[in-house]
Image: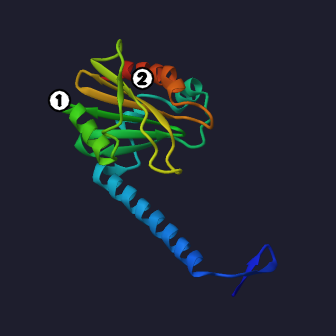
Amino acid sequence: MMWVRIDARQTKMTLTAATVLTAATIAFVTTASAQSRQEQAARVIEQPGGPSPACALLTDDEIVKISGHRSYSKPEGTKLTNGGSACDYSGANVTLFSGPKSDESYEALLKNFKKDQTPRTAVAGIGDRAYYMSPKPRDEYEGRYEMLVVKKGPHTVAIALEAQKNESTESLQPKVMALAKMALARLP
């Protein structure tokens, strides 16, 4: 038996082998999952923080206005391997690869995060090639996103918005499309 202090009072708690095993398993799975995500990020991030070409494509105010979601933090840029960059906003992300192999670089990014098998829905009328994706969350900590990936000339741009509460990812498609059009208009 063990005594635990909770809110200035003592409570008696019995620890069984099953309780200890369950707690150890949860701690291991959480740590393994975190390590896996850290390892995945380390493979594609060249330099975290700082200026990012992806952050030049949309402003935080534009994301808030079109998405209808509040912003809780300032956009943060990241330099990715293979000439890519990303910009994280509250509940949104913009990823940009430029150059003759921009689409291959983006596919490598998807594969790294095990999202390359996500079904895609072709979209006409924007860029050279475009598609929507709704990657499934890996666990309860990863959000639900709707993404629009567009190849335009030497650039591949991905815009992602996170679904809020009861919002379906598909309902975000018009918002993601509007953001993508704004971003594409700012490409060099």
User: How many residues crowd mark 1 within 10 Å: few (<14), some (14–19), many (20+)?
Assistant: few
Q: Nearer the viewer, residue 51 or 14?
A: 14
Q: Are marks 2 and 1 in contact (CB under 8 Å)?
A: no
Viewport quadrant of the N terminus = bottom right
| View extreme (top): residue | 125
* Residue appearing at x 59%, y 25% in the figure: 65
* Residue appearing at x 30%, y 45% in the figure: 80
Label disc, if present, on residue 63 of the rendered structure: none
* Residue appearing at x 27%, y 17% in the figure: 128
Quadrant in which residue 79 is drawn? top left
Quadrant in which residue 57 is drawn? top left
User: How many residues crowd mark 2 within 10 Å: few (<14), some (14–19), many (20+)?
Assistant: many
* x, y percent for residue 43: 28, 53
* x, y percent for residue 36: 37, 59
Q: Is residue 124 above or below residue 103?
A: above
Q: Nearer the viewer, residue 87 or 127?
A: 127
* x, y percent for residue 172: 52, 26
* x, y percent for residue 161: 49, 33
Asked whether, in this view, residue 111 is left or right of residue 167, the answer is left
Asked whether, in this view, residue 15 is left or right of residue 82, the answer is right
| CA–CA distance in space, label 2 to label 1 | 20 Å
Asked whether, in this view, residue 117 is left or right of residue 75, the answer is left
Q: Is residue 37 above or below residue 73?
A: below
What residue would you read off at disc 2?
Answer: 180
| View extreme (left): residue | 100
Label disc, if present, on residue 100 of the rendered structure: 1
Q: How is the image coloured?
A: rainbow
Quadrant in which residue 130 is drawn? top left
Q: Nearer the viewer, residue 127 or 51?
A: 127
| View extreme (bottom): residue | 1
Q: Secondary structure at mark 2?
A: helix
| Mark 1 residue type | Pro
